[in-house]
Amino acid sequence: MSPLDKLTAYFEKFPGVGARQAKRFAFHILTLRPEQTHDLANLINGLANSVVECSSCRRFFPAQAQGERLCSICDSTQRDRTKLLVVARDNDITAIERSGVYDGLYFVLGGTIPLLTNNDTTLRLRTPALKAVVNERLPQGLSEIIFGFAVNPDGENTTRYVESAIKELPGAEDLKMSALGRGLSTGSELEYADGETIKSALKNRS
Amino acid sequence: MSPLDKLTAYFEKFPGVGARQAKRFAFHILTLRPEQTHDLANLINGLANSVVECSSCRRFFPAQAQGERLCSICDSTQRDRTKLLVVARDNDITAIERSGVYDGLYFVLGGTIPLLTNNDTTLRLRTPALKAVVNERLPQGLSEIIFGFAVNPDGENTTRYVESAIKELPGAEDLKMSALGRGLSTGSELEYADGETIKSALKNRS
Amino acid sequence: MSPLDKLTAYFEKFPGVGARQAKRFAFHILTLRPEQTHDLANLINGLANSVVECSSCRRFFPAQAQGERLCSICDSTQRDRTKLLVVARDNDITAIERSGVYDGLYFVLGGTIPLLTNNDTTLRLRTPALKAVVNERLPQGLSEIIFGFAVNPDGENTTRYVESAIKELPGAEDLKMSALGRGLSTGSELEYADGETIKSALKNRS
Amino acid sequence: MSPLDKLTAYFEKFPGVGARQAKRFAFHILTLRPEQTHDLANLINGLANSVVECSSCRRFFPAQAQGERLCSICDSTQRDRTKLLVVARDNDITAIERSGVYDGLYFVLGGTIPLLTNNDTTLRLRTPALKAVVNERLPQGLSEIIFGFAVNPDGENTTRYVESAIKELPGAEDLKMSALGRGLSTGSELEYADGETIKSALKNRS
């Protein structure tokens, strides 16, 4: 395979990119100036070293001081340490922080667990690491875990799977576990809402 | 204008129909057999007489016994008469009844009130009729009004407008008024949710 | 079935209309004033009598003088009677006349013939009538038939089917038969064009 | 700006990529194994050296033998050297070669010239290089230039601009210049075709 084809193959694995767009990306690289391709290659090469995976919530953050292992949220004394919001990906945290309505801590599971694959241990994502975090925080006052996965079958399966994994922990009996509330989201029209959404919207009326 | 053009003009006023589709509709009429066009014309002509507007909730229902004025929901002794859910259109009631999670009564406002037009009295829809219904029901135990309008600026404006109209009624002080709960609706992903939705989803976690 | 449901069922058979939109149409009828529903019903009822199917090209045109059987195009002395353009539907003629680039006559086949159904005689549409028209026009100087069906498998099948039906006519040997030219249509980009389109575009370069 | 943000900024300049997808790309890089990021970075860094811009048609091709300057098409003795097809981008050549219906030579202009910017010399793309190629080939028998730009205002402007630039060359009087033929492209329906397309489809009937 030629370098052009190899590069195109890498681009095809980028999220949401098809064969034709991957090829356009490769031709786009050819239009860059040498200092730009050099810079881009360096950024890709060094990215893993420029970010640190937070040892607590597992999201990526820019590496700064030597040896720093906690992201600014996990390290903050301003956050409510009794709450832990479990999400699929880093980008979910970005959306929630932008809304400015949550002051607890997070944990990034790394994805969702597809329905019918609960027995495939390779799909447990960071469930073991989450259990360790919960285990460590329980004596420190952690009292509630909130699941923030997508409102679809895989998201619901992930909530069930992770919830029962946490329940196995000694001392988890008193832990409150909840999922983000359902209801009419912005732009929703009642006429097109499904039964589950209407039910939640009625229950959560305010 | 030819009859074909006149008919096309009527079809263009049907909800969601453009010029080209309206013309296709007219040609479709030409493909019907005479007994079909006759039947269709009779149905259109007689529709208003075949349905009755419920004197209470204002939705349309099939006319049956002579003089019947209340729809099956408003007439039922099984429904919780302390709750009144106000919606924009008949179709909203269909969606809620299909979900089977609401046992109170309804009122069809007839649409939503566009933002910035609150002073245009022609846009108040059935607000006066709603006030009359609430006034009549207050002594009979009505204790809560739920607004079920779309989650968009017009829907919210309608909620505000109708809510303050009802508050003017004597005896409305103790009436609980709420809107359907917001949150993540089925299919929603956190990453793409707006701040208002995230806020409600967090508040309504369960 | 209630009249509302019956009417909704008629609307569901309108081209491109689904169950929910059909119901919206029915409710729309309920919002019309009595004189409007009356007018609409009359138009539907009388449409077939207000238009005449041209005895030559078979398109519909507004009935005017008593006994008139030919549309303005077929009746015109300005049109080139050596050419006959066969299309699927009345609307196709509208599009071509709007472009102002064709001066011959037309024939409306009434649809296209789906691939693999050539032996189903109910799907031959107006092929027999077309043969009669061609047969009548051959001695009058008809020299070319152009097929203007969609550029897709059904359209191509229709061209093949109708072409061989016409070839069976005595005297059809010298008739020129062609299909509308393929090529890049407005908005096309070469990169996304299929091989057949590129081939025609190269052949028809000018 | 952090390396993550810098990398995201590069990805945002990739064709057809928005802010959110660019961020997903950056997180995707973080999921790659070190040998993969290294390989990807090397491919990006070395791409410009792994391909050669053909000195004749200007498309990119894999560099092989030392000093090779002509791509396999321009170097082939099987191609018809009397024809030159001018296209906007490398990908256009891929589409045409895939169709297997063209046996002449190519020239990649490097884009199209937006309408109303003909006087901006920075937008002339490779027009000067094209003139040089034509000038060199005229004595060798070049007799026809075909323009293969998109069927839209910019594509048509490019055809006009490049055509008049070539006409300035001494000896270009006898050069035949044409554009790819228009017509109904695969999937087109007559009813939705514009006048220009119908006109060409009628002219190019076959």
Image: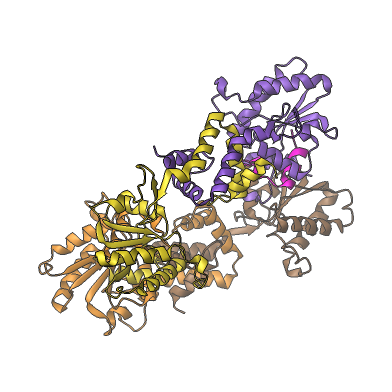
Chain colours: A orange, B yellow, C purple, D brown
With A30 as the anchor, is B51 left or right in this view? left
Q: Quadrant of residue A174?
A: bottom left
Q: Is residue D191 above or below residue A89?
A: above
Of the pair D136 and B35, the residue shown nearer to us: B35
- Residues in magenta? D185-206
Specify the farthest residue to the front.
B67
Q: Is residue A84 above or below residue A193?
A: below
Is residue C61 visible to us here?
Answer: yes
Specify the farthest residue to the top.
C170
Residue D189 inside the magenta-drawn segment: yes
Q: Is residue B14 above or below residue C111?
A: below
For the C terminus of chain B, the quadrant is bottom left
Q: Who's the residue at 70% across and 16% down the image?
A: C168
Q: Who's the residue at 79% across and 22% down the image?
A: C137
Of the pair B86 and C177, the residue shown nearer to us: B86
Q: Who's the residue at 88% across and 48% down the image?
A: D174
x then y, percent, for residue B204: 28, 68
x then y, percent, for residue B2: 69, 42
With B43 as the anchor, is A84 left or right in this view? left
Residue C11 inside the magenta-drawn segment: no
With A106 as the anchor, is C113 left or right in this view? right
Q: Quadrant of residue C151?
A: top right
Of the pair B98 and C131, the residue shown nearer to us: B98
x then y, percent, for residue B178: 32, 69
x then y, percent, for residue B140: 25, 64
For the N terminus of chain B, the quadrant is top right
